[in-house]
Image: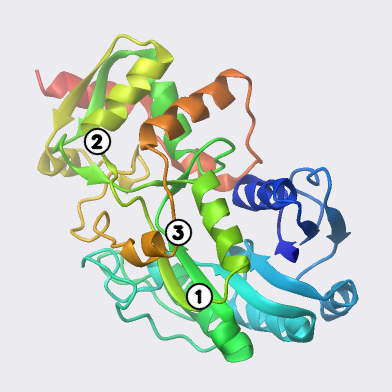
Amino acid sequence: MRILVIGGTWFLGKNIAEGAIARGWSVTTFNRGRSGGDVEGVEPVHGNRTDREDLQRLAQQGPWDAVIDTSSSDFPPRDVLLAATALRNAARRWVHISTVSVYQGWPHQPLTDDSPLLDAPADADESYGHNGEDGSPTVYGFQKAGGERAVREVFGDAAVFLRPGVILGPGEYVGRLPWWLTRAKRGGKILAPAPSGQRIQPVDVRDVAGFALDQAASATSGGYNVTHPVGITFEDFLGECLTVTGAAGKPVWVEPRVLAEHGVAQWTELPLWRTHAGVWSVDSNRAVTAGLRCRPIADTIRNTWAWLAADGRPVDHPRWAEHGIAREKETKILASLT
């Protein structure tokens, strides 16, 4: 098996490249060579996916049985279309890492793989789309939907789309789980979003990588929601963060109305907290039937803490700074509850 990974140096792309090498596959990676190092054993090609000449030079390194594109999130549909078109004659199939944000109903409605998608043209530039008044749809969702259309127009039934919600695990660059672990380690009273029994569905990066590789080797097509089929309650999630860090902290569960009154931002200030009905109601049965296997989220938490404790350093990314409530704000809110 011979594959091309667009990206391949950090988090999901790195796990895909390492997993493919472990399977004995021949792996080419294509990236700018600016973030992270090349995985040992791959054949690296450095270039810009928006440069037609770089893509033509890359295509000459083929053919490949599959392309796995892990880096499309920062590029408009027209750039995805450019890459897919340049590589069509050099690859048998295309595995596209997308997102649940492509759905019209996200995050308000429960989703299946057959839920309707946002409409965006394959050649749209970065200005296409709009943000809804309530936070959905988003420009990001339109952009990713257009990227899917671009790949579909070029590769047809030889394309498969993986739509994760939230990906966690060692090497995470967004900072959601690392923030909760760091906060748990500090101990004391911890501001926590009620209800404590809310079940969340983050998926481990290593499980997404394994499923992407399985799809690269298969003959399937279409879309798959890639979310944890069992999930974990927020109470158990925070409990595991406290356990693995050995901290003496105590969650204080606060109703969403009260958090809103104090101006606590959903999704960022308290990572993974969001009140929309569909955000943690994404059906992944099709992916499970196709072979998706998800480890317990408690294992993801333990492994991520082990990575952080061993001085794990993610690739620098601006989204890291967006996550986590300021200590002073948390303290003030907790004091107001007594």
Residue hosting label 3: 291
- Residue 78 against residue 303 in the figure, above or below: below
Tag 1: amino acid: Gln
- Residue 162 against residue 311 in the figure, above or below: below
Residue at 57% in and 46% down: 318
* Quadrant location, the N terminus: bottom right
Q: Could you tell me which secondary element the residue under label 1 belongs to?
A: helix
Image location of residue 24, percent across then percent down: 76, 51
Residue at 18% in and 42% down: 198
Disc 3 vs disc 2: which is toward the camera?
Answer: 3
Residue hosting label 2: 234
Image location of residue 218, percent across then percent down: 58, 70
| Side of 160 where 88 appears, left or right | right
Residue 313 occupies which quadrant of the picture?
top right
* Quadrant location, the C terminus: top left
Q: Residue 291, can we see it? A: yes
Tag 2: amino acid: Phe
Residue hosting label 1: 143
Residue at 40% in and 35% down: 324
Tell me if label 3 and label 2 are in contact, CB under 8 Å: no
Query: Of the residues under marks 2 and 1, which one precedes in the sequence?
Result: 1
Query: Of the residues under marks 3 and 1, which one precedes in the sequence?
Result: 1
Q: Could you tell me which secondary element the residue under label 3 belongs to?
A: loop
Residue at 36% in and 11% down: 247
Image location of residue 19, percent across then percent down: 66, 48
Query: Of the residues under marks 3 and 2, which one precedes in the sequence?
Result: 2
Residue 56 occupies which quadrant of the picture?
bottom right
Q: CA distance from mark 2 to mark 1?
A: 31 Å
Q: Could you tell me which secondary element the residue under label 2 belongs to?
A: helix
Tell me if label 2 and label 1 are in contact, CB under 8 Å: no
Tag 3: amino acid: Gly
